Amino acid sequence: MRRVLVTGAAGQIGSELIPKLREKYGRENVVASDIREPSETLSDGPFEQLDVTDRDRLKEVVKEYDVDTVFHLAAILSATGERKPHLAWYVNMDGLYNVLEVARELELTRIFFPSSIAAFGPETPKEMTPQETVMRPKTIYGITKVAGELLCDYYFHRFGVDVRGVRYPGVISSVAPPGGGTTDYAVEMFYAALRHKRYVCFVREDTVLPMIYMPDCLKAAIDLMEADPSRLRHRADYNVTGMSFSAGELAAEIRKHIPEFTVEYRPDFRQKIADSWPRSIDDSAAREEWGWKPSYDLAATTKDMLEKLRRRFKEESP
Ligand SMILES: NC(=O)c1ccc[n+]([C@@H]2O[C@H](COP(=O)([O-])OP(=O)(O)OC[C@H]3O[C@@H](n4cnc5c(N)ncnc54)[C@H](O)[C@@H]3O)[C@@H](O)[C@H]2O)c1
C-alpha cells in the first residue's frame, strides 16, 4: 500500500485527485497539503499546510507520515506566471528541486510531476504536436515546465529517482475553479452559461487548444504511476490529450443544452500565450507505453459538466 503526499492539493486538479487517491489507497494513507487552507473536499483525511519552497518542512512532513510517493501539483500557472514571473520561477523550480532532493535523500518510491502543453512554443508544429519536437516556450511557466522535465530526467538517470509525468493540455472540471491558466475560459464558459447565459471570452472564437476532462486527467496520473517501469521509455514528458476544439465550438456545444447562451470575444494578453501553444497533440507514446486512452470527447464533457454544475448550484442555493 502506498503512503502518498499531494502538494498543491487545494487546486483544480488536487481537489479531485485527493478523493480518488483516498478511495484507492485508504483515507489515512493520503496526505493533502497546500500553502493555503484546505477546502471542504480535502478535510476528510490528513492535511498539512506546506510551502514547497521550504525543503526542511517538506522533509519533515514526508518523514512524519512515512510517505513513499509524492504527487507534486503545487505550481504557479501560465497566466499568473506572466503577471508574476519571479514567483513562478521560484515556486515551480525550487518546489520541484526540493521534492526531487527529498525523494533522493529519503529514497522515495515514486514521484508524479505534471508538465504542460505550455512546454511547447511558437516554433513547435501546431497540429498533432509530436512527443519529440522543438521545445522553445515563450512564457516563464513553459520555461519552468521544460526545465522541470529535464530535471526529472536527470534525477532518474543520475540518482535513480522514479519520477514520471505527463504534459497536460487544458483541464476542464467542475469542482475547484482553475488556478490562473490560459485555458481557464473553457471552464469559465460553463459556469457563465448556467449563471448568466452570457460570457466574455478572453481568446478569439477561432482559438483551438487541446483539452482534457477531469476524469481522464486523473486516470492519466494514476495509470502512469501504476505503469510497469520496464515499459516506460520516457519520464516526465508524456504527451496526453482528450480532445481539441475552438472557443466557438465549445460555445456551440453548450448552446445545444442552453440555446440562449451568448459569447462575446474580447482577447487579452492570454491570446498571445494561446497562439504559441499546439492545437492538437500526438499522444501515441503514452498509448503504446502505458495504455493511455481518454474516454471523454467534447459532447460527453459538455453534457457531464452541465449536469454536475447544475446539481452543485442547486445544492448550494436550494
Ligand atoms: N489545470 C490545468 O489546465 C493544467 C494544465 C497543465 C498542467 N497543469 C499542472 O498541474 C498541476 C496542478 O495544476 P492545477 O490546475 O491544480 O493548479 P492550481 O493553480 O489550481 O493549483 C495549484 C495549487 O498550488 C498551490 N501553491 C501555490 N504555491 C505554492 C507553494 N509555494 N507551496 C505549496 N502550494 C502552493 C496553490 O495554493 C494551489 O492550490 C500544476 O503543476 C500545473 O502546472 C495544470
Image (cartoon, rainbow, N blue to C red):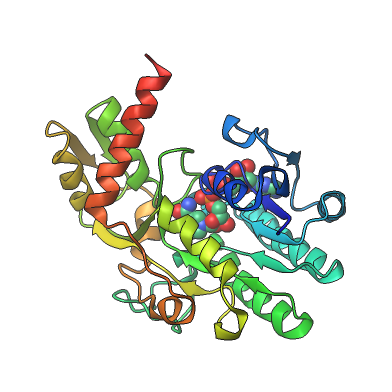
Q: Nearer the viewer, residue 141 or 72?
A: 72
Q: Position of residue 110 (x, y in %)?
A: 69, 68
In the image, residue 299 sits, relative to residue 306, either above or below, namely: below
Q: Residue at x 35, y 35 (%)?
A: 308
Residue sitting farthest toward the top: 318
Q: Residue at x 64, y 58 (%)?
A: 71
In the image, residue 219 sits, relative to residue 259, either above or below, namely: below
Q: How many marks?
A: 0
Left or right for 92, reference 159: left
Q: Quadrant of the rendered structure where residue 185 is?
A: top left
Q: Position of residue 283 (x, y in %)?
A: 39, 75
Q: Residue at x 73, y 77 (%)?
A: 155
In the rendered image, is residue 233 in sight? no
In the rendered image, is residue 21 in sight? yes
In the image, residue 55 sits, relative to residue 10, either above or below, namely: below
Q: Residue at x 77, y 62 (%)?
A: 98
Q: Nearer the viewer, residue 133 or 123?
A: 133
